[in-house]
Image (cartoon, helix red, strand yellow):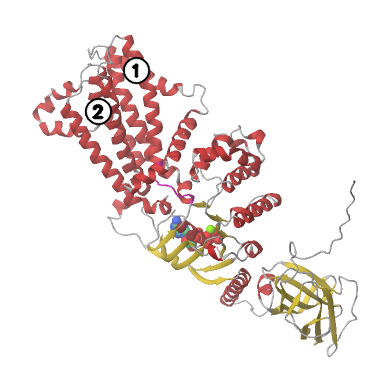
Amino acid sequence: MPKPREQEATAIKVEHVKKKYLLYHERHDSLKDLILSGGRRAKYEVLWALDDVSYEFKRGHTYGLIGENGCGKSTLLKAIANILRPESGTVTVDGRISALLELGAGFHPDLSGRENIFLNGAILRLSRAEIEARFDDIVAFSELEEFIDMPVKSYSSGMYMRLAFAIAVNVDPDILLIDEVLAVGDVAFQRRCFRRIKEYQAAGKTIIFVSHDANAVKDLCDEALLLDHGKIVASGLPMNIVSAYFELLSKKEAARRVKSGEETDVAGDDLSAATQKRYGFGAATIKEYAFLNAAGEPVKSIKSGDRVRVRVKVEFNDTVPNPVVGMALHSSTGLDIYGVNNAYTGQPIAPKNSGDWLEAEFVWDAWLREGNYSISLGIVDLTDGTATPADRWVDAISFDVAAGQEIIGLFDLRADITVTENG
Amino acid sequence: MNKLRELYEYKDLIWTLSVKELKVQYRNSVLGFLWSLLNPLLMMLIFSFVFAYVFKFGIKDFPVFLLCGLLPWNFFNTALSTATGSIVGNGALIKKVYFPREILPLASVLANLFNFLLSLVVLFLFLAFYGYHFWVWLILLPFIIIIESLCVTGLALLLAGLNVYFRDIQYIVGVALMALFYATPIIYNIERVQNSYWMTHYPWLMTLYNLNPMTPIVNAYRSILYSVQPPSLSSILYSLGITAFVLVLGFVVFRRLEPAFADEV
Ligand SMILES: Nc1ncnc2c1ncn2[C@@H]1O[C@H](COP(=O)(O)OP(=O)(O)OP(=O)(O)O)[C@@H](O)[C@H]1O
Ligand SMILES: [Mg+2]
C-alpha cells in the first residue's frame, strides 16, 4: 500500500539497541543463596536477545516482524514499548503507543466484564473519560451485552478473548504493537481483527506486527523485518522477506540434518520445498516458457483486460503416467489469485516417457488491477491421486499491469448489472 | 521530577488499581466493606479484654486509647504487607505492559489509606460516645495522616522493589511488622517505656526505640484524639525528617531496581 509522502516522518527510531540476558546455571534468588555463595557470582552464559538493532519505523506504515522462536521479536517490541530497558542504545518514540503483547493484561477474574473494561482500559493508558466514551463500542464489538455484569471468571475463554480484544482495538493509539495476539480466536474473530487493522492503516497509524503467519504478514504489511539471533538480517518487501525467512528456515533445517547425519538432498518436507525457487524430482523439466500478448509477442507489461498467453514447454526425462501441467497467478503480496491445470479443466494428457515433450498454452483475460504479478509454473505427476512435482518453478514469470481503468478490489469479475426499478 | 509528572499522568490508573484492590478484597465476602471496620473493632475487643481486664494496665478508657494507636498501625501494617508483594504479584502485568512501576505499591497504599479513613469515622463515633472533645485539634489530623501516608509510601517502594530480587523480604516484613507492633506504643503508653529500668539505664536503647517512625506518628494521633492536645512540635519535625528520608530512599532505590523488573519477576 503506497502512502502519501507527507507521512514519511519517523514514528519510532531504534538505534543500536542491545539487550542481553544472563542465563544462570544456578540462580541466587533468595538471601540464603546469596549468603551461602558468599557473594560469589553465579555461573551464567550471556544471551544477546537484541544484538545492535537499528531501524527507523515510518509513520503510517505497517511492519511485520518475523523470525524463529526466540529470535528476539517480543524483546524488540518490549524495548520499543519501554517495558524493558536495553543495555545500550536508544529508542525514540513519537506518539502514543499501545502494546498488545497480551490480551486482557490485568484482567481480574473476580471483577465483572464492566469493571475489567475500566481496569484494562486504564492499564492500556486510556483515561476514565475516554473509556466511558468508548464503553458502548467496546461492549458492542465484543457482543457480550448480556454478560457484561458477570464476573469474567464465568466467561468461556472465547468470551474472555473477545472482551479483551474489544478493549484493545478501541484503544486508538498512534502506534500499535501487536505480538501474535491475533493468532487466537475463531475465524470470524480473526477476520474482524484484520478488518480493524485495515481501518487503523487507513487512519494512518503505525503498526508493528509480530506473526508466524506468513500470509498475514504479506497481506497486511508494507514492509517486513526478519530477525535472527537478535539481529535484523533482512528488511524490505514482505514477499521477499517471507521467502528469505523460509530460506533461512530450510538452511537451518539442512544444517540440522547434516549435523544429525540425515540425508539432505531430498526435497522431502513441504516447507523447505516451497521455499526454493525451483524444485522437483526431475522426471520432467520445464525447458522454456513465455509470457505473450494476444498477438504472440513476448511482453513485460500489459493493460487491464488484455488477453495474454502463458506458454510452457516441457521435456520428459522419465516415465510420467499422468502428467499435469499448470500455472498459478500471485499478487505482489504473495496472494494466490488464481491457479489452473489440465487436470482441473478435465483435459488428461497421455502418459509420457523419457524423450517425449509437450507444449501447453494458457490463454486468459487479465482483468487485474494495476500492480505487479508473478506466475508460477509446474509439471507434476498425478498418479493415484497424489501429486509428485516433477518440476515446479516458483515465480517464473513476473509482469506488470499498467494503470488504466480503476478496478475495485483485486480483479474485475466483469459483472453485469441489471436494475429493476419503479417510477 | 519527571517521574512525578508521569505519575500524575497515570493518575487514572492509580485510582483504578486502588479501587480494584478494594473491590477484590471484599468481593466474595458476605459482609464486604464492613470488614475493614469490624476487623479493628474485634481486635480492640480482644486487646481490651487482655490488657485492661486481665493485666489491668490501668489506662483510662482503654478501648479508645487503643483504637487511637491501633487504627494508624493497621494502616501501616496492611499497606506494607500488601505493597511488598505488589510488584512480584503483578509480574504478568509488568512483563506485558508499560506503566510507571511505582503505581503498583502506590495503589496498595492508597487502597489501605481509604480503609483507614473509613475506620477513622468509627473511631470518631467511639470518641464521641466516650465524651472526648476530639474535634478541638482535629484540624491537625490530616497533616499527621499525610505524614504517615508518605512514610508508608517510601517504605512500600523500598520493600516492593527489594522483594523482586530477594523474595525472602516478604517473610521478613511479616515478622518485622509483628515485632514493630510491640515496639510501638499501641497497647501501652510511651511513658511506660521511657520510665522502664532498661531504658533509663541504657539511653541508646531509647534512641533505638525512637528510630521507629511509627512511634511519633502514633503519639501524634493519640495526642490529638485522646489527650486532646496538639502533638509536640519536636516529634512532628522528627517524623517529618524520617518521612522525607524514607520517601527519598524509597524512590531512589526503586528507580535503581526498576529497569530490570520485567526480567526478574
Ligand atoms: N526474562 C528472560 N530471561 C532470560 N532470557 C530471556 C528472557 N526473556 C527472553 N529471553 C530470551 O531472549 C530471547 C528472545 O526472546 P523473545 O521472547 O524476544 O523471542 P521471540 O522472537 O518473541 O520468540 P517467539 O516467536 O517464541 O515469541 C530468547 O532466546 C529467550 O530465551
Ligand atoms: Mg514472542
The verdict on label 2 being within 8 Å of ligand 1 is no
Q: Position of residue A364 (x, y in %)?
A: 83, 74
- Residue numbers of the magenta segment: B96-103
Where is residue B29 shown, x and y percent of the image?
Answer: 51, 25
Look at the image and say whether residue A66 sits in the magenta stretch: no
In this picture, is A295 found above or below A44?
below
Pinpoint the chain carrying mark 1.
B
Residue that sits furthest to the front in the current view:
A423
Separation of marks 1 and 2 at Cα, in angstroms: 17 Å
Residues A87 and A93: in front is A93
Question: Callout 2: helix, strand or loop?
Answer: helix
Is A233 or A69 nearer to us in this picture? A233
Q: Earlier in the sequence, mark 1 or mark 2?
A: 1
Residue A285 vertical placement versus A374 (above, below): below
Left or right of A208? Residue A342 is right
Relative to B236, residue A212 above or below: below
Q: Kindly state the secondary structure of the residue where label 1 is placed.
A: helix
Neighbourhood count class around disc 1 (C-alpha, 10 Å): few under 14, some 14–19, many 20 upward:
many
Mark 1 highlights which residue? B123
In the picture as drawn, the residue positioned furthest to the bottom comes out as A355
Main secondary structure along the magenta-highlighted residues:
loop
Using the rendered view, name the quadrant where residue A382 is placed.
Answer: bottom right
Location of mark 2 (residue): B217
**In which quadrant of the rendered image does the N terminus of chain A lie?**
bottom right
